[in-house]
Image (cartoon, rainbow, N blue to C red):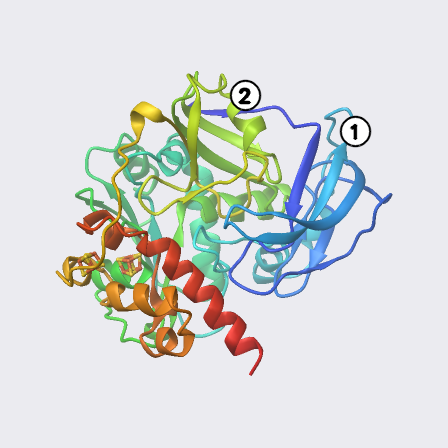
Amino acid sequence: MKIVTIKTPDQVIIPLQQHDGAVCDSLVSVGDIVSVGQLIGDGEFRIHSSVSGEVIAVSELPHPTGKDVLSVVIKTHDGEKREIEPVELSAGKIRRIIKEAGIIEPNGHPTLRTKGDIDTIVVNGTNTWDLSSYEALMLDHPSEIVYGLKALMETVGAKKAFIIIELGSEALNTMRTETIPDSNIKVIATPGYYPPGTENTLSKKFAKKRVPRGSTPEDRGVLVSSIAAMKAIYDALRDGEPMIKKVVTVAGAVGSPRDVLVDIGAPISHVIKECGGCSGTPVKIIVNGAIPGTAQYSDEVPVIKTTTGILVQTESNIEREPTAPCINCAWCVDECPVGLMPHLLYGYADSAQFEKCAELYIGDCVECGMCAYVCPSKLPIVQIIRYGKYGVAEMEASE
Ligand code: SF4
Ligand code: SF4
């Protein structure tokens, strides 16, 4: 087994926004006793408690995206977990079960996000170099992943599915063997490339359906999902377990870098400690990959449904270079996988011209980080674009 289950922390912090959408309403108050799998937040999506314990706070707390978000803090009861009652999730059809389980993709979209006709499902099983959670899941749980995929195909009416895995991944043979009986599921090996998870790219490259600007792959009959979601569907259907755990890659300057199964809401500090602690003095902790990830202000932010990796860096891992003004070289434009003009977005967002940001489709940015990676002026383009997206969302909400 590649995945190590780490112990439940004394306290979890469960943000009521772990998806691409509005903050959920809290269904609990301070003093309430909750159990594992209990629904504690509802709204656009559903959020469940990952532990049994007592609610000790419901307040705005730091979130891995860098903002403060309404969160439920639960003091766990001796780290013990009660058995989950599958009866709560088993009533009704698969669609309802998946929806009620609150399954979210790593990009924050719900897995089941369309009622339209879907012909093809593309399951992203590729990881970037510092993340390996998908490979670990495929090696440890191949049959569960195929079960989840078949259930999703049945639910949306898809006739075929592709599982995309990097060439050279140990999981390639495992998944090929697992899918031999299913002629409508194909495992495709792809050279390692970046960014790996752009939905539109996956739709175009593997389902051969180009997605015009302003459309989604679902509009073209393609549903792009992930290995993590397939396992979460299995957990929901077979074990009655909503999305309350996540497999996360812990990499970099830690005692034991590895893939771990974590309770959602576990503070990053707890996860790092359970992986042998920091080797040396940490100067940067990045969530979700070295290039696209977000550097954290605090190691007390929690693991959430969209967390895929935690990278710990010491001074020797970091190249510090001063920023310089944009020289309009357009390297960022050449590299942007979704055809944006990152240098313009950077300038408009930096000067709070959010209308201009919206006009230039800032919402299409998948935050892959390629623009910042190639920028000779070392500008923090992605951080400023994130700020711009936030500004656009605020502007649109006030209209
Ligand atoms: S992060 Fe930069 S390169 Fe990536 S999609 Fe956004 S603007 Fe384009
Ligand atoms: S790569 Fe950097 S310097 Fe070049 S145009 Fe883009 S933002 Fe400006």
Q: How far from the left and from the top, in percent, is residue 222?
A: 34, 66
In the image, is 98 to the left or to the right of 251?
right
Q: Name the image quarter holding residue 34.
A: top right
Q: Position of residue 301 (x, y in %)?
A: 57, 40
Q: Residue at x 29, y 40 (%)?
A: 128
Q: Secondary structure at mark 1?
A: loop
Q: Ligand 1 near label 1 (Cβ, under 8 Å)?
A: no
Q: Which residue is mark 1?
A: 77
Give the quadrant of the C terminus: bottom right
Task: State which tag comes first along the sequence, 1 or 2.
Answer: 1
Q: Which residue bears the numbered disc 2?
A: 274
CA neighbours of label 1 inside 10 A, class few (<14), some (14 to 19), many (20+): some
> Disc 1 residue type?
His
Q: Is residue 5 above or below residue 337?
A: above
Most extreme residue toward the right is: 31
**Mark 2 surroundings within 10 Å by alpha-carbon count, few (fewer than 14), some (14 through 19), many (20 or more):** some
Where's ligand 2: which quadrant?
bottom left
Q: Residue at x 73, y 34 (%)?
A: 83
Residue at the extreme left of the image, as rendered = 329
- Answer yes or no: disc 2 within 8 Å of ligand 1: no
Residue shown at 34%/79% (left/top)?
A: 359
Q: Secondary structure at mark 2?
A: helix
**Numbered mark located on residue 269 in the image:** none
Residue 147 in picture, x, y percent from top left: 46, 45
The total of numbered circles placed on residues is: 2
Q: Mark 2 belongs to which amino acid?
A: Glu
Nearer mark to the viewer, of 1 and 2 = 2
Nearest the camera: 18 or 325? 325
Work out which quarter of the rendered image holds the N terminus and state it: top left
Q: Is residue 224 something one can see in this rendering?
A: no
Query: Separation of disc 1 and disc 2 at Cα?
Result: 19 Å
Asked whether the viewer can see residue 228, the reply is yes
